[in-house]
Amino acid sequence: MAKREKSSYMIKSVANALDLLEELSNEGGELGVTELSRRLNLHKNNIFRLLATLESKGYVEQNKETENYRLGLKSLELGQNYLRRMSLIKQVRPILEELVQKCNENAGLGVVRQQWVVYLDVVEAKRMVRVACRAGWRLPVYASAIGKVQLAFKSESEIEKSVDWKNMKAFTPNTITDKEAFLKHLEEVRERGYAIDDEEYEEGVKCVAVPVRDYTQRVVAGISIQAPVFRVPDERIEKEILPLLKEAGVKASQKLGYGE
């Protein structure tokens, strides 16, 4: 059976909305319904409905005086988020590589996205036995060190958005699934400045993470070390892993303008 091209799955209305945004972006200013209709070869009614939808979501806004349209703040946020993410990976990659070179364990960079931790980058150790992890992997925010170290510095409302208290799944006997216990745990993480995933997502795997801050002093990411539990006893974490991680967290934060 022949594989269909992805273009054959295209939703026309979505494509039209994206074409409209591109026109506004290329213009750099404002465009009216009539001009957009001419450029996109779409009926004015279609253009108006697309604009109304995009305006309701914040991706375009209307100039009340001219009644023309321009890109909205949401469009700007999307572009900034992309640039921030690409810049973050580029800035932190050498720090992860140095971290792996010093401790010979996997190191990763991750961010919280809704109820997940997304690994943006991972540098693997040169060991026969190591934890399987790669860029793009998602883990439940409450069962990962990178997730917990970011949640610990968020507001109560932000935490509520990231954790579905009624559906906290126990992946292992160590997974924290009680709301009160988890919030208390986050307080401890905030006080000590680092988080540990003590076989909470996968048995036999332990992770330690520290926060990464940007120029606004907000925690925007986390850096972690992942290793088989038998290689990271408490003594090694205290004497070797934590000092290296904290140093890496400070370097990464400085790259993003923290402390300047």
Image: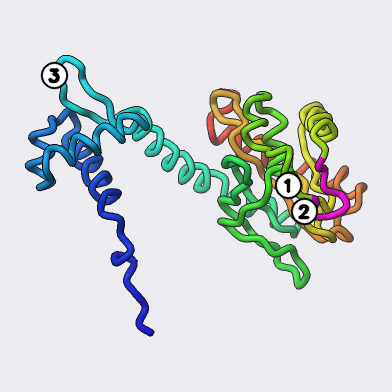
The x, y position of residue 96, in whole percent, is 63, 50
Counting residues from the N terminus, which is met first, the one under dot 1 or under dot 2? 1
The x, y position of residue 86, in whole percent, is 46, 46
Residue bounds of the magenta highlight: 170-177
Element type where label 2 sits in the image? loop
**Disc on res. 201:** 2
Closer mark to the observer between disc 2 and disc 3: 3
Q: Nearer the viewer, residue 122 or 102?
A: 122
Q: CA distance from mark 2 to mark 3?
A: 55 Å
Query: Which residue extends farthest bottom?
Result: 1
Q: Determine which quarter of the picture holds residue 101.
A: bottom right
Marks 1/2 in contact by CB < 8 Å: the verdict is yes
Circle 3 sits on which residue?
66
Marks 2/3 in contact by CB < 8 Å: the verdict is no
Question: In the image, is 168 to the left or to the right of 16?
Answer: right
Residue at screen point 33% across, 63% down: 9
